[in-house]
Amino acid sequence: MASNRPLGRGPDELRKITITRQFTELPPGSVLIEFGKTRVLCTATWTDGVPPFLATMDQGWLTAEYAMIPAAGTGRTPRDRGGKTDGRAVEIQRLIGRSLRAIVDLGALPRKTIWLDCDVLQADGGTRCAAICGAYVALVDCVLEMDRQKLLKRWPVLGAVGAVSVGVVSGEPRLDLCYTEDVDAEVDANIVMNDRMEFLEVQATSEKKPLAKPGLDSLLALAEGGIQKIFALQKQTLGAVKRG
């Protein structure tokens, strides 16, 4: 389909996605994921113990942290915000945590907490979606190491999770928005799904114009097609998962 998108992408085309496993050597799970010019380092580690609200329960936990390095975008963002909470980062890390917990059997993690740390190295739109997709691969590698060390009650990863942005730009529904599209979008949405093609999260905002239901349906269909391709890439990257 003809489109005026950056790099000549069609409205239903993803940016080039690259997933590099074991990007750093020390964490059990370490993935660099690239959605076009957006690059996110996702690491997965575990610690003993669970949050206080799970103190009396025989299960584990999974949580996430998200941050942008100071020069990830244009200009510089200070590391120290003078004690102020970065509301955007908190909202995104909660989204990452929710998305990954949706495909993990927490009862299989005997009082262990898995930490997913997602650090944006370069931001060009879709950082939260890239973080979710990369964190899933890092999670699998982390769990493989836990399995090798006989730390699990059973295999805890119940499926895959993928995410992608969609939006309406210049009246056109588009998949996987880069930054220049995102800032001009009339509608902006982030979609998270499991590999049964069920929706885990739909975040949609009408930035400039209201969106009727048929328009939302078209965005969801775009997202489904893109996420199916992401699942195929995740599967190819992980290959045959060999448990200990």
Image (cartoon, grey):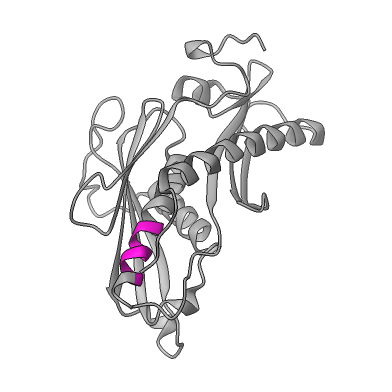
In the image, residue 6 sits, relative to residue 103, either above or below, namely: above
Q: Position of residue 79 (x, y in %)?
A: 21, 44
Position of residue 110 relative to residue 201, above or below, is below
Residue located 61% across and 29% down the image: 167
**Left or right for 154, reference 214:** left
Magenta-span inclusion, residue 145: yes
Q: Choose between 157 and 189: the one closer to the eye.
A: 157
Q: Quadrant of the C terminus?
A: bottom left
Q: Which residues are magenta?
A: 140-147
Taking 173 as reference, is 147 above or below it?
below
Residue shown at the point (61%, 51%) measured from the top left: 195
Q: Position of residue 131 (x, y in %)?
A: 41, 45
Q: Residue 77, position in %: x, y?
A: 25, 36
Q: Quadrant of residue 36?
A: top left
Query: Horizontal placement of 199 versus 130: left or right?
Result: right
- The number of numbered discs placed on residues in the rendered structure image is 0
Q: In the image shown, does 6 or 94 lie closer to the viewer?
A: 6
Q: Residue sitting at 46 percent across and 52 percent down?
A: 91
Magenta stretch, overall SS:
helix
Quadrant placement of the N terminus: top right
Residue placed furthest toward the bottom: 56
- Against 98, residue 211 (above or below) is above
Task: Decide if residue 164 is on the left or right side of residue 89.
Answer: right
The residue nearer to you, when weighing 188 against 61, is 61
